[in-house]
């Protein structure tokens, strides 16, 4: 297939924002390709020279590319900049200056049109030019390529070379196009795309073998898989409800998640974002090499930095291990890390993602050698779970993960199979200062309460909740609030600050919603504290202190690799 057809397709994609039209156009195009053109074409439409898992890169600098454009178009460079300013796109600007080039420079392109496969081969040559003199070689190769391109083709070649396609046609839409082109259910295509790490390869398999080609796909070592994610649980009760009364609890370590691929003694380590971080963790590599009892395996775990006292160190310390690639040896000595494994996705040709969690964990134990697994227990009561959570926190960890015993491993999905449970913060005693009528069944009741902390002489709102009280309690509370009402503002009733309630919450957030600048997240009333007077309620200083302490903890979680 000629490269020209691919380019014309991209033009059409650029001109529409209708997803359906885009999908249909690409599906049609894919249907018309030969088997060996499918992956290169798919990659190029997405603006990639190579498939995602492929470690090769073109490595072409703007200086190199602009030299070639300048030479081939023979234009005044100011014209290029003005074309760029009017389009905002390097590819489009290239097209404009190529259209203006002198007729003598256009002779070759008519003779032999570029094909998709030729373009791929040229990309391969460019990527393979390494070492001394590679810059010149790359420049010559790009010149050969662009000299055979029409202005429109040059536009897209440049876009692919600099990695900015900007047609709005993304990977998710490509999955839909593959599904439509080969009449294969979208969810199968999506799963296969996750497993192989590249939609182009999936398209190829679909074309060649149909649905069977992707149904039993396994993992491939050295192709990282999107990690399974966890949802935040409001409390342990929710976890037990969702997991059917029994759940596996694991310490949630505050470190960096890694995915480890092993094949015949070769080890590669990927970060949570699937970046290769092997070079930063040499001691983990040797540990894996020495301990893992499998020829091939894909494992997951968390590395944490540990201090001399054996307690986990702040997250920033660990991050220095990933940033200082130039003095790895020093970093290894300064910031020792420990690895704890928690999952096994693949071992010796066998994919375990559909295998239930308990069985994966058992197999992980067999494969891990002497590498520790995350501390774990299967809990079926709140008491057990609470004391495990307390133990985790007192040992300096973040909290717990709760994993459903029979759950499969769902790459890239944040579902209810895995919950994260953060340290439960001490409840606050707060005063109700206003209330709102509820909705639906509760429309006659004041069921939504504004909660305030003591702030000198006054009370400052830090949250609102309609959770925690039973219907009877709400009815009774409505009566009590009406008696101490000061005035009504719309659906809100302002009351005298008299009633104290105990409030649990998950987090204190910064929020412009209230004057205090802080807001409780997932607030719920746990008790009505008629034994306490408003003067005994918690103060805004206390709230601020808790906010700051958790902020320090959170600051480290938000940095990622
Ligand atoms: P979050 O990043 O807050 O969504 O929490 C999930 C993260 O917790 C994972 O990505 C891991 O990095 C980390 N983690 C710590 N301990 C475990 C564990 N035992 N199982 C799974 N993930 C864990």
Image (cartoon, rainbow, N blue to C red):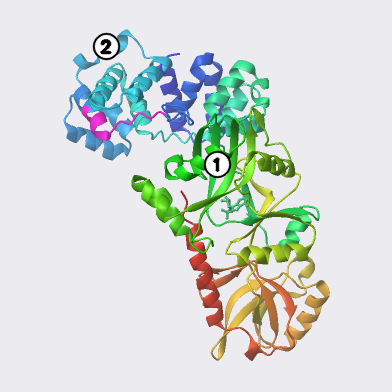
Which picture quadrant has residue 7? top left
Which residue is found at the position 64% from the left and 25% from the top?
214
Residue 158 seen from this side: yes
Quadrant in the rendering for residue 27: top right
Q: Can residue 270 be seen from the camera position used here?
A: no
Quadrant of the image containing the N terminus: top left
Whether residue 262 appears in magenta in the rendering, the answer is: no
From which residue to which does the magenta span run? 56-67
In this view, the residue in front, 372 or 129, is 372
The secondary element bearing badge 1 is classed as strand
Relative vertical location of residue 11 with respect to residue 535 in this rendering, above or below: above
Q: Position of residue 535 (x, y in %)?
A: 63, 91
Residue 436, quarter of the rendered image: bottom right
Outermost residue, left direction? Answer: 76
Estimate how packed mark 1 is, as few (under 14), some (14 to 19) or many (20 or more) residues with alpha carbons within 10 Å: many
* Residue displayed at 52% across by 25% down: 26
Dot 1 or dot 2: first in sequence order is 2
At 61% from the left edge and 56% from the top edge, which residue is drawn? 252
Q: Height in image: 454 above or below 63?
A: below
Toward the viewer: 217 or 43? 217
Image position of 32 with respect to 173: above or below: above
Q: Mark 1 points at which residue?
A: 259
List x then y, in percent, for residue 31.
56, 18
Q: Residue at x 48, y 31 (%)?
A: 52
Q: Distance between the residues labelled 1 and 2?
A: 49 Å
The relative height of residue 291 versus residue 296 in the rendered view (above or below) is below
Front-lying residue, 7 or 487: 7
Which percent across, then down, holds residue 448?
69, 73
């Amino acid at each position: 297939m000629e490269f020209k057809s691919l380019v014309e397709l991209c033009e059409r994609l650029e001109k529409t924002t209708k997803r359906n039209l885009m999908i249909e156009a690409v599906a049609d195009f894919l249907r018309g390709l030969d088997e060996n053109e499918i992956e290169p074409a798919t990659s190029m439409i997405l603006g990639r020279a190579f498939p995602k898992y492929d470690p090769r890169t073109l490595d072409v600098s703007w200086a190199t590319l602009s030299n070639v454009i300048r030479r081939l178009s023979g234009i005044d460079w100011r014209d290029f900049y003005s074309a760029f300013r009017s389009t905002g796109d390097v590819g489009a600007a290239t097209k404009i200056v190529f259209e203006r080039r002198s007729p003598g420079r256009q002779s070759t392109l008519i003779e032999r049109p570029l094909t998709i496969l030729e373009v791929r081969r040229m990309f391969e040559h460019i990527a393979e030019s390494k070492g001394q003199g590679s810059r010149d070689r790359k420049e010559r190769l790009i010149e050969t390529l662009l000299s055979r391109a029409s202005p429109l083709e040059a536009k897209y070649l440049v876009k692919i070379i600099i990695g900015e396609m900007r047609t709005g046609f993304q990977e998710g839409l490509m999955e839909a196009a593959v599904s439509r082109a080969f009449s294969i259910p979208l969810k199968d295509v999506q799963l296969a795309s996750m497993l192989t790490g590249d939609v182009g390869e999936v398209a190829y398999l679909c074309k060649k073998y149909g649905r069977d080609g992707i149904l039993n796909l396994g993992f491939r070592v050295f192709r990282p898989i999107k990690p399974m994610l966890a949802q935040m649980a409001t409390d342990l009760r929710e976890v037990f409800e969702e997991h059917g009364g029994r759940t596996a609890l694991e310490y949630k370590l505050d470190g960096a998640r890694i995915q480890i691929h092993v094949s015949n003694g070769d080890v590669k380590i990927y970060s949570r974002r699937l970046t290769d971080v092997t070079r930063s963790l040499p001691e983990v590599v040797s540990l894996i090499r020495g301990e893992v009892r499998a020829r091939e395996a894909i494992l997951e775990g968390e590395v944490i930095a540990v201090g001399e006292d054996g307690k986990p160190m702040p997250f920033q310390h660990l991050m220095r291990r990933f940033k200082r690639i130039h003095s790895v040896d020093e970093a290894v000595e300064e910031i020792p890390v420990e690895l704890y494994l928690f999952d096994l996705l693949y071992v010796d040709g066998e994919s375990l993602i559909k295998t239930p969690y308990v069985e994966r964990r058992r197999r992980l134990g067999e494969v891990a050698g002497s590498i520790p697994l995350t501390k774990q227990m299967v809990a079926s009561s709140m008491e057990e779970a609470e004391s495990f959570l307390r133990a985790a926190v007192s040992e300096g960890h973040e909290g717990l993960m709760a994993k459903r015993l029979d759950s499969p491993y769902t790459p890239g999905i944040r579902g209810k199979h895995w919950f994260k449970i953060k340290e439960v913060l001490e409840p606050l005693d707060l005063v109700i200062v206003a209330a709102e009528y509820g909705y639906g069944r509760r429309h006659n009741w004041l069921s939504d309460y504004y909660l305030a902390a003591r702030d000198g002489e006054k009370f400052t709102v830090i949250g609102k909740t309609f959770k925690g009280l039973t219907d009877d309690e709400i009815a009774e509370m409505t009566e009590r609030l009406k008696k101490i009402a000061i005035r009504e503002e719309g659906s809100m009733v302002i009351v005298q600050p008299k009633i104290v309630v105990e409030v649990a919450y998950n987090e204190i957030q910064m929020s412009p919603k209230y004057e205090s600048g802080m807001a409780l997240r997932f607030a719920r009333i746990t008790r009505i504290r008629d034994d306490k007077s408003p003067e005994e309620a918690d103060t805004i200083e206390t709230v601020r202190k808790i906010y700051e302490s958790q902020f320090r903890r959170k600051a480290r979680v938000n940095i990622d690799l």
